[in-house]
Image (spheres, coloured by chain):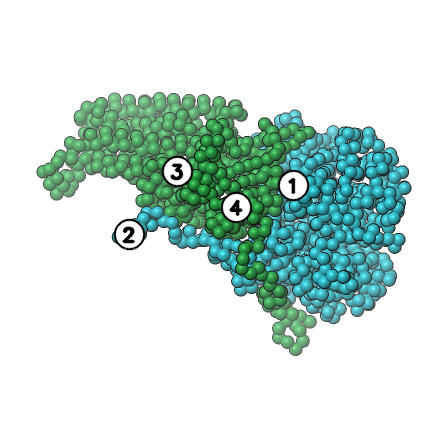
Chain colours: A green, B cyan
């Protein structure tokens, strides 16, 4: 019964074979549109401008909010018609809501790249992987130029550029540049069932001039004067004053960027060590400097290199990093790379001079150099020079984050943190090294460094806790959501931070005199800074356009 | 020199390269405009979407006959070049890694599902069900099927199960979505016949949506509404301020389950104000006088008290309807899923009849269907009626169908099947011992879910036939049969406006998955009734059988020559008799233009009944009324498919959330986005609070797509349609202590 009589093939075999045959093409007529305009043109014709942008003008997305009802076809059509990666979307749809029980207000918001007049992504890019097209104003991303540093992701206040780990680069909406060039509509415009998305032409100067300091595209979006977004949202309804993004209260752990945490803490430690070396050179006695310089410089140089090496891990395509000079004019990322470059050069020279005596003892041929110059004599001035460059590098690091305009990364919070790390770890690090090398000597200096570090630790901790408790208590505070994120989602890590900070202070006072105590104090302090930097990245509120319900 | 400079410049700033090439667009031919170069098709073909009842045409991009991409079809008369995100992503779930690729049998020792070959699976399927039948009789095995497979497969399943295998009881998940409309139409019009065409959205000057949120549930139908050039009044009646309510010109946030009272009250005002069409009523209906007398008790004051709508606004609403020249009435699950849903749907029909809004452009009492082939299920599944819209209790019908199918009339049961809820009762009572679930996820979707899943444990044998071995139901099966999905097989679907559209095989099913049609063919052979279905050789052969069987019925389709004609015409609406004047038939046709209905006297009926209170009202212990419904346009039912697309997943919340009014949230100390607990008398679940004015105080809303939601729902059923009342049960809400 299981086999068809007289045949070796069963019905199962036949049906399994049939299942694999694709017959749609043979079986059915093909109704092709041949030549001429794309078939969809009849629907999108009215949604495109009649002419190309003239000088001083650019394309902009127009969104008729009264027609947008949240079907989200734009998102998936963009995905399919642009051949994006499986999980990649260049458009998103969220909503804002408010009003009261009798007059509920809700409005879906479709959003893509705003092709800003002053694009933060472009300004931040260290390798000029962004281009604001002269003729159309479209902000294009040069995918092959991108090194995957993801700074544009941090810079864009609308969460537009998206990093692809698989590709090692960022990609974003290009307003279907290719389609517009051929008078075809972008995918989203073609696919909106209610014609809510259109392409408009705006005058760039008027766009820029029309934006006032407090202007926003919509409730809960970033102030427009930062990047001058071009999208024109329009509605005949009045948006109620209490309207909020639907995800306004959601808490989200942002990417921790482990290589950046390590890179920042290590480079700042190194900068701190060079600063202490320079200070000893300037303020200390000659013998103290002579004893300290070799180990301090060597260790600081090694840590700097470790920090820079680990930073490379952050890049999706590190081989292109040499292009970082391209962005110097506008990008703090370029400036940081440049500053750390010369810092590393100076540090190398300084280190060579500091270790010259033992080095030339080991490699006698080096003595030949002394016929022309005496490197050891440059140790002190070079230490000072290196320290200055190091602090400049730390400042550039800080500016990278300050320049994103995110409240949790504002200047008043970033500068104390980054320079706090530099001084504190530099001091306690140097103390441990000196105590370890020469347990008997320089006790005054070691004690000074240790006590200073401990006091600074207390001061920093007090400052952090005051900020934190104030932010947590007041829902109106700019950084309330950051504090709440830590409190609600990462409380054990917060206790760890407290424990490490307290431990570091205790260790400084109790065991400080002994090199082991100093080491422990330093290690705990180092841990505290790693945790502080972990919060710096994960608890920041990344501004974005209104999203959907966050659950 | 210039070249070298250019080369260096190119190295410094790379405008081109492999990453850039990846996104290059080229003219795609076939009228597609520019498309990604690596997705350039060598052919295209159109087929209808397999999600909802809108029935959009999708333009499948083919390479070597296989689908590589798709876009919305520009020409298809339903969707006019547009699709919702589910349609755009229709191919993605087919490639999901959890597709069932071989039959799976539960190992009794390990308790795990393990692969077996088809031969073993089919032998076991027949052996176990035959054994149950032998011991417990023909009423001891049932199937629960779906509105998601093609008509030809539904017909085959129903005919095989009842005529071939000799069982009686079966039902479909259309019980959960369209049973009410089917019964309401059948009783009012004499046949289950939604009268409209989508063109009516564009022709109305007043559109009234009740319990319907097309912006989210049927976005392409909303597209048709926005194409209306008559500056229409758009009225939405819904307890929630839905997306559609926001887009309406008038929104009436009635108290949950006060819809029937409201509709009777409107009828009363319309009659009292003479905003009715006496000539139409006299010529084409019966029962109006009784109805008018009945609704007199629903004075505006009474109705206002019960619905929460002020008397003034009731008058304004009635007047908008009365003033309208072309008023269309639309309803969806808000009406269908209620404890008195049939009468509610008929109350909508009554409004259309008494105002003469029937059979003219832009009018009608129009049920918007849920699933892509709910209509196929209603007419041809051989479940609630014999295939072709016939009656199991009617001797003449049985004889006629038997003749057309060339089978013994005795093979056709002379009694009706138990309904879905009664099948569940029978399983619990031990009367039904074997269950075959086809393309539905009952363990997630059935009302009062926990009881349902407990009940399944009483079965001797549970077979689940599905695309995925991971659905909540498949995970409970003794035997899983791997099915091919939409796009991997052929057949027809019938949409909300009665349009029969074509599904084609444009991609290969994974592993040994087979089209449901072919699984039924194999079962027929293994069961020993292959001979009875000798003519049922292919979906198109069955389509010809269905033409023959339904000839002369209101749903007749003999004017449709074959699949090719469906393809050429962009789908064809039923009825399509051979005698249809035009060839090809007009693209959009509505029913009852001549005012003649399907009852013997050709008159429509005014049907009504005293409203009953919600069977589980809010009380002191459970003070909230819980509403359920669709969450977003990117979610489909229990998410067995939409959950497989990365893009769709980005477009809806990952976890269940509950909508709470700010007044309630403040009173209960619930912060936005805080975790909460929701309890009914049946279960307790957790959710994230979404504090919003779109729900009224005292009401909560949960999207139905999340598995825990139906643990809460109360099993009330409409007495006529047996459709479950998902939309109202009593619950309690409490804040959950903060995380960590």
SS at mark 2? helix
Q: Residue beneath label 1, please?
A: B703
Residue A531 higher or lower than B482, as above or below: above
Q: Whole-percent x and y of residue A86?
A: 51, 50
User: Label 1, label 2: how many angstroms apart (C-alpha)?
Assistant: 64 Å
Residue lying at 73% horizontally and 44% vertically, measured from the top left:
B204
Q: Please state which of the two labelled residues, at mark 1 or mark 4, is closer to the viewer.
A: 4
Q: Which mark is residue B173?
A: none
Residue lying at 68% horizontally and 44% vertically, measured from the top left:
B228
Q: Please state which of the two labelled residues, at mark 1 or mark 3, is closer to the viewer.
A: 3
Q: Whole-percent x and y of residue B468?
A: 61, 54
Residues flagged by tags 4 and 3 on a common chain: yes
Residue A4 higher or lower than B396, as above or below: below
Q: Label 4 neighbourhood size at 10 Å, few (<14), some (14-19), many (20+)?
A: few
Q: Residue beneath label 3, please?
A: A124
Q: Label 1 neighbourhood size at 10 Å, few (<14), some (14-19), many (20+)?
A: many
Q: Please state which of the two labelled residues, at mark 1 or mark 2, is closer to the viewer.
A: 2
Q: Residue beneath label 4, please?
A: A50
Q: Residue beneath label 2, please?
A: B2
């Amino acid at each position: 019964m299981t086999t068809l009589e007289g045949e070796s093939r069963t019905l199962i075999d036949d049906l399994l074979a049939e299942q694999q045959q694709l017959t749609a093409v043979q079986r059915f007529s093909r109704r092709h549109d041949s030549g001429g305009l794309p078939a969809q043109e009849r629907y999108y014709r009215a949604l495109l401008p009649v002419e190309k942008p003239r000088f001083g003008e650019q394309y902009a997305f127009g969104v008729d909010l009264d027609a947008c009802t949240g079907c989200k076809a734009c998102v998936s059509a963009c995905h399919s018609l642009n051949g994006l990666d499986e999980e990649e979307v260049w458009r998103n749809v969220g909503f804002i809501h408010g009003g009261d029980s009798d007059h509920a207000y809700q409005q879906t918001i479709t959003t893509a790249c705003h092709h800003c007049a002053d694009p933060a992504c472009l300004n931040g890019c260290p390798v000029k992987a962004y281009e604001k097209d002269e003729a159309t104003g479209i902000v294009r991303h040069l995918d092959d130029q991108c090194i995957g540093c993801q700074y544009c992701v941090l810079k864009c206040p609308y969460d537009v550029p998206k990093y692809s780990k698989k590709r090692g680069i960022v990609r974003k909406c290009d307003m279907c540049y290719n389609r517009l060039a051929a008078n075809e509509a972008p995918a989203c415009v073609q696919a909106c069932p209610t014609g809510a998305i259109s392409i408009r032409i705006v005058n760039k100067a008027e766009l820029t001039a029309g934006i006032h300091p407090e202007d926003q595209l919509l409730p809960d979006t970033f102030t427009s004067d930062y990047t001058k977004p071009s999208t024109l949202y329009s509605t005949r309804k009045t948006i109620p004053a209490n309207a909020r993004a639907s995800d306004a209260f959601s808490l989200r752990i942002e990417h921790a960027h482990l290589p950046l945490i390590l890179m920042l803490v290590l480079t700042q430690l190194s900068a701190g060590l060079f600063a202490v070396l320079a200070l000893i050179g300037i303020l200390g006695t000659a013998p103290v400097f002579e004893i300290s310089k070799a180990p301090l410089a060597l260790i600081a140089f090694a840590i700097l290199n470790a920090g820079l090496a680990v930073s490379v891990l952050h890049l999706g395509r590190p081989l292109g990093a040499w292009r970082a000079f391209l962005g110097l004019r506008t990008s703090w990322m370029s400036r940081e790379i440049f500053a750390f470059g010369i810092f590393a050069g100076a540090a190398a020279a300084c280190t060579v001079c500091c270790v010259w005596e033992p080095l030339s003892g080991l490699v006698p041929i080096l003595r030949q150099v002394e016929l022309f110059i005496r490197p050891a004599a440059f140790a002190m001035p070079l230490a000072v020079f290196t320290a200055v460059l190091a602090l400049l590098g730390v400042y550039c690091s800080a500016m990278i984050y300050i320049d994103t305009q995110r409240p949790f990364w504002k200047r008043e919070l970033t500068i104390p943190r980054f320079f706090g790390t530099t001084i504190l770890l530099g001091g306690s690090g140097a103390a441990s090294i000196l105590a370890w090398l020469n347990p008997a000597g320089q006790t005054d200096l070691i004690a000074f460094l240790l006590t200073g570090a401990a006091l600074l630790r207390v001061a920093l901790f007090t400052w952090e806790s005051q900020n934190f408790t104030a932010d947590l208590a007041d829902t109106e505070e700019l950084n309330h959501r950051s504090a709440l994120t830590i409190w609600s989602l990462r409380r054990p890590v917060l206790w760890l931070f407290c424990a490490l900070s307290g431990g570091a202070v205790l260790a400084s006072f109790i065991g400080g005199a002994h090199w082991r105590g100093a080491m422990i104090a330093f290690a705990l302090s180092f841990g505290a800074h790693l945790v502080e930097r972990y919060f710096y990245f994960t608890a920041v509120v990344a501004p974005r356009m209104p999203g959907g319900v966050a659950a | 020199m210039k070249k070298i400079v250019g080369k260096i410049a190119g190295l410094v700033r790379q405008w081109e390269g492999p990453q850039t090439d990846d996104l290059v667009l080229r003219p795609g031919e076939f009228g597609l405009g520019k498309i990604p170069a690596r997705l350039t098709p060598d052919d295209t073909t159109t087929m209808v979407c397999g999600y909802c009842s809108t029935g959009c045409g999708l333009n499948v991009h083919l390479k070597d006959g296989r689908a590589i991409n798709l876009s919305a079809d520009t020409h298809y008369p339903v969707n006019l070049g547009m699709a919702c995100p589910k349609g755009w992503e229709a191919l993605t779930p087919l490639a999901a890694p959890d597709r069932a690729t071989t039959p799976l049998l539960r190992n009794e020792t390990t308790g795990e599902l393990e692969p077996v070959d088809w031969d073993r699976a089919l032998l076991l399927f027949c052996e176990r069900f035959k054994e149950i039948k032998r011991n417990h009789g023909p009423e001891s095995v049932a199937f629960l099927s779906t509105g998601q497979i093609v008509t030809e497969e539904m017909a085959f399943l129903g005919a095989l199960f009842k005529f071939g295998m000799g069982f009686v009881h079966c039902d479909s998940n259309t019980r959960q979505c369209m049973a009410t409309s089917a019964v309401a139409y059948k009783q009012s019009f004499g046949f289950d016949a939604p009268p409209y065409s989508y063109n009516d959205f564009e022709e109305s000057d007043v559109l009234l949506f009740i319990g319907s949120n097309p912006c989210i549930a049927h976005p392409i139908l909303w597209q048709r509404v926005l194409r209306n050039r008559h500056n229409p009044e758009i009225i939405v009646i819904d307890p929630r301020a839905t997306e559609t309510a926001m887009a309406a010109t008038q929104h009436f946030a009635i108290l949950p389950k006060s819809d029937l009272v409201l509709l009777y009250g409107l009828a009363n005002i319309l009659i009292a104000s003479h905003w009715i069409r006496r000539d139409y009523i006299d010529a084409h209906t019966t029962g109006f006088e009784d109805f008018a007398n009945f609704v007199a008790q629903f004075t505006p004051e009474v109705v206002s008290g019960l619905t929460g709508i002020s008397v003034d606004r009731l008058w304004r609403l009635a007047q908008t309807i009365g003033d309208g020249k072309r008023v269309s009435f639309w309803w969806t699950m808000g009406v269908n899923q209620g404890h008195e849903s049939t009468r509610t749907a008929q109350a909508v029909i009554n409004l259309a009849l008494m105002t003469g809004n029937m059979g003219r452009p832009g009018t009608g009492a129009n049920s918007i269907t849920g699933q892509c082939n709910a209509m196929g299920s209603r007419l041809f599944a051989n479940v609630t009626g014999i295939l072709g819209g016939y009656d199991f209790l009617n001797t003449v019908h049985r004889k006629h169908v038997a003749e057309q199918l060339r089978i013994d009339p005795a093979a056709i049961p002379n009694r009706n099947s138990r309904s879905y809820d009664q099948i569940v009762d029978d399983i619990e009572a031990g009367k039904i011992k074997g269950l075959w679930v086809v393309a539905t996820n009952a363990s997630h979707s059935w009302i009062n879910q926990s009881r349902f899943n407990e009940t399944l444990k009483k079965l001797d044998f549970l077979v689940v036939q599905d695309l995925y071995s991971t659905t909540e139901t498949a995970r409970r099966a003794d035997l899983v049969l791997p099915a091919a999905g939409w796009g991997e097989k052929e057949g027809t679907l019938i949409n909300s406006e009665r349009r029969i559209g074509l599904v084609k095989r444009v991609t290969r099913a994974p592993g040994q998955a087979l089209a449901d049609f072919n699984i039924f063919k194999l079962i027929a052979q293994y069961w020993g009734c292959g001979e009875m279905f000798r003519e049922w050789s292919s979906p198109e052969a069955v389509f010809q059988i269905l033409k023959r069987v339904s000839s002369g019925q209101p749903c007749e389709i003999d004017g449709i020559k074959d699949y090719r004609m469906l393809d050429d015409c962009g789908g064809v609406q039923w009825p399509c008799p051979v005698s249809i004047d035009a060839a090809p038939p007009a693209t959009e046709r509505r029913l009852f233009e001549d005012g003649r209905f399907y009852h013997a006297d050709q008159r429509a009926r005014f049907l009504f009944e005293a409203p009953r209170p919600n069977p589980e009202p809010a009380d002191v212990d459970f003070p909230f009324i819980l509403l359920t419904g669709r969450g977003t346009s990117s979610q489909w039912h229990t998410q067995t498919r939409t959950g497989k697309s990365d893009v769709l997943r980005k477009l809806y919340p990952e976890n269940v959330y509950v909508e709470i009014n700010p007044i309630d949230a403040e009173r209960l100390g619930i912060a936005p986005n805080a975790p909460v607990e929701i309890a009914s008398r049946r279960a307790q679940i957790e959710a994230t609070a979404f504090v919003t004015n779109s729900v009224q105080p005292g009401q909560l809303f949960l999207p139905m797509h999340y598995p825990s939601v139906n643990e809460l729902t109360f099993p009330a059923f409409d007495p006529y349609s047996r459709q479950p009342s998902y939309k109202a049960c009593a619950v309690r809400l409490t804040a959950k202590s903060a995380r960590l």
